[in-house]
């Protein structure tokens, strides 16, 4: 019996996705460049072997799938995907769909989509979030491509995706690169969430002097409140774990240099390209870069005075409460910025991205899943054309409630010399966004002074240059 779907790439994500697909009753053919991995995968598939067709060459693989074939590619992103498509193409026939499920750059997805247009083959760029566990038991799936091609794979994709209540966290979001773009911004927001959680951890560790297990307690309490989310939950768990080798708290033995694979950086780059302020996401990416400059940080520490940092953060109930609300306010800024970048990209690329739908499919399965996304779904459904999430009535009310806490926490942290780039960017974003008279009038004057760039006037007079005289260069 032929398989109804195929999958290439039995790495961490691909093998788990394949098991998930097989488990939901879909017959799947699998192929991996290194044949040993295919054999080991099949040998370990247990009962699910009955729904899996292991293959060792691409021709055998393609022949094992019933046409028109949906084929998922889940390999290392970048050139390997182009090479794999080239190798695969000679075996494919009219109507076959190539689905790239890796973390592709959406510009590549747009190019690949266009390259296959008119060839009888179609391309889907599919963002998959949830890591290994998500791939195995239910990821969040963000699809970009033609609506017709999605209709052909919708059943299998919704069968394997995460569910929020009974609602599958899988959706068609728009043409070509829409799915991979949304996945990229998902990851940018994930960077921001993680960075701000780490900053709060830093305030408690260095500003208050709490141990990892004491801090774990704070996060696990927050997980019962408005901050309830996967990332808060796992933060409490990693803070509680002890190293079996040394008996020390796990976070205390881990080097403070964060890795990154690119999607956070792409979010910041695209935000800049689209001229959308995504300062919290940018700060999170920059913070990871600075974290990895460990030798420079070590050399710098003894060069600067510490006296000015004597301010100590007074612990107590006020602090826990303020930290919780501060993190919540800052989280609102990060998500507002991420959605703002998506709104702008949607316009630029003609995607017509469905904002409530995006928040909806992030509610389960993915790394940033949380209760909070339900509020975003509601806010965007009620006010679809709103300029920014923070000016929806529900979110404006939340910001008003939490902003004083964010301000006190950023003030306390900076007074104590504790870096809080994510939280501080969020605070400044709110302060700038709600300021009807900013300070760019001075920048316009400067630009006119040195470059005769001209300015608009508040009084509407038709004079657009200043009397700078011979001082102007
Ligand atoms: P792994 O490193 O576990 O597996 C990599 C896979 O890519 C292997 O099957 C490998 O084949 C294949 N591969 C690498 N280079 C080539 C090549 N030149 N030609 C053909 N095949 C190649 O990676 P992951 O499973 O973690 O990641 C796969 C994709 O999923 C990536 O795009 C990643 O960004 C994305 N992703 C990962 C997540 C995660 O949490 N890990 C989450 C969401 C997305 P071989 O066995 O022959 O080396």
Image (cartoon, rainbow, N blue to C red):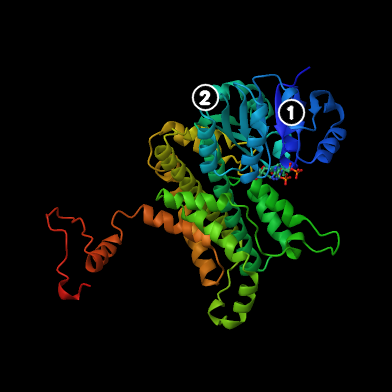
Q: Is residue 96 left or right of residue 27?
A: left
Does the numbered disc 2 mark a residue whose Cβ is under 8 Å from ligand 1?
no
Residue 359 image offset from top left, x and y in percent: 53, 36
Classify 168 as above or below 305.
above
Front of the two marks 2 and 1: 1
Q: Is residue 41 left or right of residue 337?
A: right
Sequence-wise first label, 2 or 1: 1
Q: Is residue 375 visible?
A: no
Residue 30 image offset from top left, x and y in percent: 76, 31
Considering depth in this image, is 307 or 147 the residue closer to the camera? Answer: 147
Residue 152 image offset from top left, x and y in percent: 60, 21
Category of crowding for the residue at label 2, using alpha-carbon neighbours closer than 10 angstroms: few (below 14), some (14–19), many (at least 20): some
Q: Quadrant of residue 322?
A: bottom right
Q: Residue at x 80, y 26 (%)?
A: 53
Q: Is residue 245 left or right of residue 408?
A: right
Classify 219 as above or below 183.
below
Category of crowding for the residue at label 1, using alpha-carbon neighbours closer than 10 angstroms: few (below 14), some (14–19), many (at least 20): some
Q: Is residue 17 left or right of residue 245?
A: left
Circle 2 is placed at which residue position? 147
Point out the image quarter for the C terminus.
Answer: bottom left
Q: Which mark is residue 59?
A: 1
At mark 1, the secondary structure is helix
Q: Quadrant of residue 41?
A: top right
Q: Is residue 3 visible?
A: yes
**Residue at mark 2 to residue at mark 1: CA–CA distance:** 28 Å
At mark 2, the secondary structure is helix
Q: Residue furthest front?
A: 90
Q: Residue furthest top?
A: 1
């Amino acid at each position: 019996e032929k398989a109804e779907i195929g999958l290439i790439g039995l790495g961490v994500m691909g093998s788990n996705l394949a098991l998930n697909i097989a488990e939901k009753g879909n017959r799947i053919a699998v192929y991996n460049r290194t044949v040993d991995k295919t054999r080991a995968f099949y040998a370990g598939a247990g009962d699910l072997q009955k729904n899996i067709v292991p293959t060792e060459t691409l021709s055998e693989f393609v022949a094992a799938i019933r046409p028109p074939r949906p084929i998922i590619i889940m390999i290392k992103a970048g050139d390997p995907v182009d090479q794999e498509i080239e190798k695969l193409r000679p075996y494919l026939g009219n109507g076959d769909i190539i689905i790239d499920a890796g973390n592709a750059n959406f510009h590549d997805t747009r190019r690949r989509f266009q390259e296959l247009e008119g060839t009888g083959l179609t391309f889907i760029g599919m963002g998959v979030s949830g890591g290994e566990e998500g791939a195995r038991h239910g990821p969040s799936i963000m699809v970009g491509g033609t609506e017709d091609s999605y209709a052909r794979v919708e059943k299998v994709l919704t069968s394997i995706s995460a569910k929020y209540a009974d609602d599958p966290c899988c959706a068609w979001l728009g043409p070509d690169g829409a799915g991979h773009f949304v996945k990229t911004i998902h990851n940018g927001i994930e960077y921001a969430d993680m960075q701000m959680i780490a900053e709060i951890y830093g305030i408690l560790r260095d500003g208050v002097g709490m141990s990892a297990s004491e801090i774990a307690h704070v996060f696990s309490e927050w997980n019962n409140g408005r901050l309830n989310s996967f990332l808060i939950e796992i933060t409490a768990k990693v803070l509680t774990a002890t190293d079996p080798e040394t008996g020390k708290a796990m976070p205390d033995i881990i080097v403070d240099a964060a890795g990154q694979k690119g999607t956070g950086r792409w979010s910041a780059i695209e935000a800049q390209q689209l001229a959308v302020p995504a300062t919290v996401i940018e700060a999170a990416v920059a913070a990871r870069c600075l974290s990895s400059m460990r030798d420079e940080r070590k050399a710098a520490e003894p060069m600067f005075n510490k006296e000015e940092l004597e301010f100590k953060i007074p612990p107590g109930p006020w602090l826990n409460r303020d930290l919780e609300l501060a993190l919540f306010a800052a989280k609102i800024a990060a998500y507002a910025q991420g959605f703002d970048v998506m709104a702008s990209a949607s316009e630029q690329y003609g995607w017509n991205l469905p904002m409530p739908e995006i928040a909806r499919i992030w509610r389960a399965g993915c790394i940033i899943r949380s209760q909070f996304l339900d509020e975003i779904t509601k806010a965007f459904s009620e006010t679809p054309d709103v300029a920014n999430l923070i000016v929806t009535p529900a979110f404006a009310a939340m910001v008003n409630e939490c902003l004083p806490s964010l301000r006190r926490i950023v003030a306390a942290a900076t007074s104590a010399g504790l870096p809080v780039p994510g939280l501080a960017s969020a605070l400044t974003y709110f302060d700038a966004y709600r300021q009807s008279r900013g300070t760019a009038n001075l920048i316009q004057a400067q630009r006119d002074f040195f470059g005769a760039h001209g300015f608009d006037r508040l009084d509407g007079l038709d004079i657009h240059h200043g009397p700078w005289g011979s001082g102007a260069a």
